[in-house]
Image (tube, grey):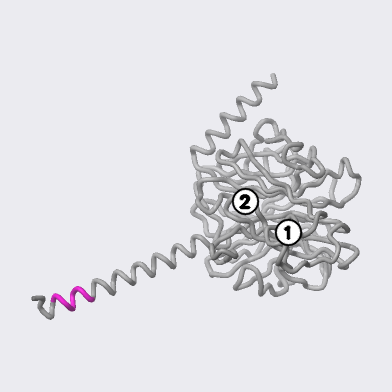
Amino acid sequence: MRTQRQTIHGMALKIAGAALVAVAAMLSADVCAQNVQRGGYAYLYCHMSGRGEWTAYAVSRDGLNYQDLIGGDPIFDNAEHARIEGGTRDAYICRDCTGKRYLMVTTDMCVAKSHKWDNYGIDLLRSSDLINWKSVTFDFRKGMQIFCDGDTAHSVYKNWATINRVWAPQIFWDPDYVWGDGTRGGYMIYYSMLNRAEEPYDRMYYSHADRTFTRMTAPRQLFDWGYATIDCDINLLSDGLYHMLIKKEGGKPGIYTAVSKHLTYGWGEPDDTDYVSFEGKKKCEGASAFQLAGDSTWRVGYIQYSDNPRHYRICKANAHLRGFNSPQDIKGVEAPQHGSFMMLTKKEYERLMKWSSRQIAKKK
């Protein structure tokens, strides 16, 4: 027969155990609410090449000084993955929710062929080694039939055939999204769209892709501030809030930050007193924020494109992704353009370096 002391002790252990489980669940939720971060041995800059509308790699040990892989040439065949126009622009890369695979999204667009700044869809790519990629292409002109919930979802347009732009998609893991069968978790794909026949300017929209990264839901509007907005970049900061870098093309143009307590809604207008202001009246876009290993502050890459030649810069920001300062041109990349950054492990870095060496040797 148990003594009263044993009973109390057992109850205390159960309570403590439940508390630990609760804390672990909270920590797990926090981790899952941000794209998985691993490594810190090196950094990958995955970007559209300024030499052409293809995706290129550069790597760095310190996050500022880079070297092109395979000479800045395409890392994959555009014709294979960009099934609409044969060009991949604005590459965004990240790890999947398990941290074991890699995901990429690109704007399916080739101005060199079309001779216009319009396009019609995006490409979703997946890889297990950063070298070999599989993909699906979503041509938005085909309308609701391309989306996995197209039969039931609300359509943001009356006529999808008149769509003019689907630009600069990015990825954010959303553990709270619930699919129709009750499954939780999806990749929020956010991007700007323009349908000139039905809306006056580019606005931000989002869909959710499933864990296979092959199915995507119909677009929903993320926000509308009353003027054109493109090139959105979202990160979850230590304050528990979502922080967005975005290019305003209306109001006072430039790259600004906005904040929300929620990933898919609640985005208030940017703070006009704290933005990337170094370029004056020169035009910049394509912001991408990343952190260096062991550093709570941020680095922000962006393209200043009104000069010839263009300048791709990396500036500093504080732990709250504010107080932008100290812009420097990226070093070691022949043709930097709109792209994104990801930490690498030593194993990943060495794999990419060996792959690059082999590819260069084949060309000789």
Q: Is residue 319 left or right of residue 118?
A: left
Query: At numbered mark 1, what does the secondary structure look like: helix, strand or loop?
Result: strand
Locate residue 297: give its quadrant: bottom right
Q: Nearer the viewer, residue 11 or 143?
A: 143
Image quarter hosting the C terminus: top right
- Name the residue at 56% across, 56% down: 35
Q: Which mark is residue 175?
A: none
Query: Taking 171 as reference, is 63 above or below it?
Result: above
Chain part drawn in magenta: 6-11
Q: Earlier in the sequence, mark 1 or mark 2?
A: 1
* In magenta stretch: residue 204: no
- Name the residue at 55% across, 67% down: 176
Q: Residue furthest top?
A: 364
Q: Residue furthest front?
A: 151
- Name the residue at 58% across, 70% down: 241
In the rendered image, residue 125, in percent from the top left (x then y), is placed at 65, 45
Determine if residue 186 is in view: yes
In the rendered image, residue 253, in percent from the top left (x then y), is placed at 81, 64
Question: Which residue is label 1 attached to?
Answer: 191
- Name the residue at 68% across, 62% down: 149
In the rendered image, residue 84, in percent from the top left (x then y), is placed at 80, 44
Question: Which residue is label 2 attached to?
Answer: 213
User: Identity of the amino acid at label 2?
Assistant: Phe
User: Identity of the amino acid at label 1?
Assistant: Tyr
Spatial CA span between label 1 and label 2: 16 Å
Locate residue 280: give its quadrant: bottom right
Q: Residues within 10 Å of mark 2 (few under 14, many from 20)?
A: some
Query: At numbered mark 2, what does the secondary structure look like: helix, strand or loop?
Result: loop
